[in-house]
Amino acid sequence: MSTGAARAGASDVVIVGAGVIGLGIAWRAAQSGLGVTVVDSASGRGASWAAAGMLAPVTEVHYGEQALLELNLAAAVRWRAFAAELEQYAARPVGYRRCGTLTVARDTDDNAALEDLFAFQRGLGLDVERLRARECRQLEPGLAPGIRGGVLAAGDHQVDNRSLVTALLAACERAGVRYLARKVAAVRVEHDRALGVLLAGGEPVDAGAVVIAAGCWSGTIPGLPPGLVPPVRPVKGQLLHLRGPGEAPLCQRNVRGLEVYVVSRGDGRVVVGATVEEHGFDTTVTAGGVHDLLRAAVELLPEITELELTETVAGLRPGSPDNAPLIGPSGLDGLLIASGHYRNGILLVPVTAEGVATILAGNPVPDLIAPFSPTRFAPPMAVAPTVHHAGGATQGGVAGAPHGAHAGGDPARGGPFPAAPDPGGPFDRGAGPGAERGGPRVGAGGGLE
């Protein structure tokens, strides 16, 4: 995909969304020499800020998701070098730790389920070890006396997701990425291609390519042809942040049960998660969610009751119909999607950023991300898009193949990257779909982006 600007002042790429996915793409694209603009009124917020930061492709493997496992494993292999490069470039730590994950059984039923999981993991050739109860407690003395057994995935690791956000913001600023703390009103589509975006208020931001990396809101941005709107939905997850003595961490590894996970940062900070709720765009933290998470965590690590509860938070995972991400060209010339990462947003930052930046530089879609093309959900026939101009809208044409430059202009002023995330939403999305009613479901069903 060629993204050369047609006139001075216009960007090669505009990225909608400043979570870890959007920021990772921006950093890599800028490193390749492209002029990049990121638009988001709430940089680093959303799922990126709410996540626990587990990098656990082995523990997170699910039945029927073997194709996704290959992508997750490739991302995990890249994380050590990615973290080291980012820390050096940004001069900020990201809190990367190779700590492993210990999944434990509370009772006989849990132990039987773990046996099935262990057999499934070994059948996929994954590096896991089945442990007796005594061996589990030798690794983690704080486990409850009633623990019946466990499975150790020594290769799993973690990163401090909030430190990651801060480091990516700093790296983007150093790389020359322009940041607009604004809301996006629409993608500008004209003459069979995306030309940039319109900001709330009507100002155009012109670019040779547009990347939608807005998490669970990616499918709500106006201006996209109906057949190319990414089918991404919000899946709510409530999490708890606690703190204990730094000299005596609650646990050394990620500890999981079948209903909860506990991530210890190693300095006294602890994250407990996460509920799994199909409640639309609601981010309310509920008493029931807090209760259920604490109950499940205490059943694994009783000493958690002694920790200070410092924060409760709810984030929205960007789910897709097959629980796999949408990465790559959308089918509309000049438009790429990087969304739908669901449980694996933090884990997949290195491969998503690398893959999308490769495409933006004019290279073919890398084989690793090719199976996750957004076009796998597109209908057989494209629908004619609405053309969005700064002063109104008319009807336009259909999608074409990526090519060429764009018409420009640069009326929107950029600013420095923020030092810390600000509250709010990434673009002008309105109220969003209504929330379904019902209580939260607690489950160790994965972290947030």
Image (cartoon, rainbow, N blue to C red):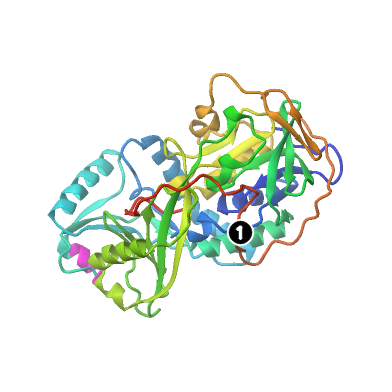
The magenta stretch spans which residues? 135-142
Q: Which residue is mark 1?
A: 424
Residue 85 position, x and y percent, is 58, 57
Residue at the (41%, 47%) spot, across then down? 436
Query: Where's the N terminus, which quadrant?
Result: top right
Between 100 and 313, the residue placed more toward the observer is 313
Crowd tier of the residue under label 1, counting other residues whose Cα lies within 10 Å: few below 14, some 14–19, many 20 or above: few
**Label 1 residue SS:** loop
Magenta residue check for 177 = no
Residue at the (19%, 60%) spot, across then down? 106
Residue 34 visible (yes or no): no
Between 133 and 408, the residue placed more toward the observer is 408
Extreme-top residue of the structure? 381
Q: Is residue 349 left or right of 7 when viewed as pictured?
A: left
Magenta residue check for 136 = yes
The answer to whether 39 is drawn above or below residue 13 in the figure is: below
Give the image quarter of residue 323: top left
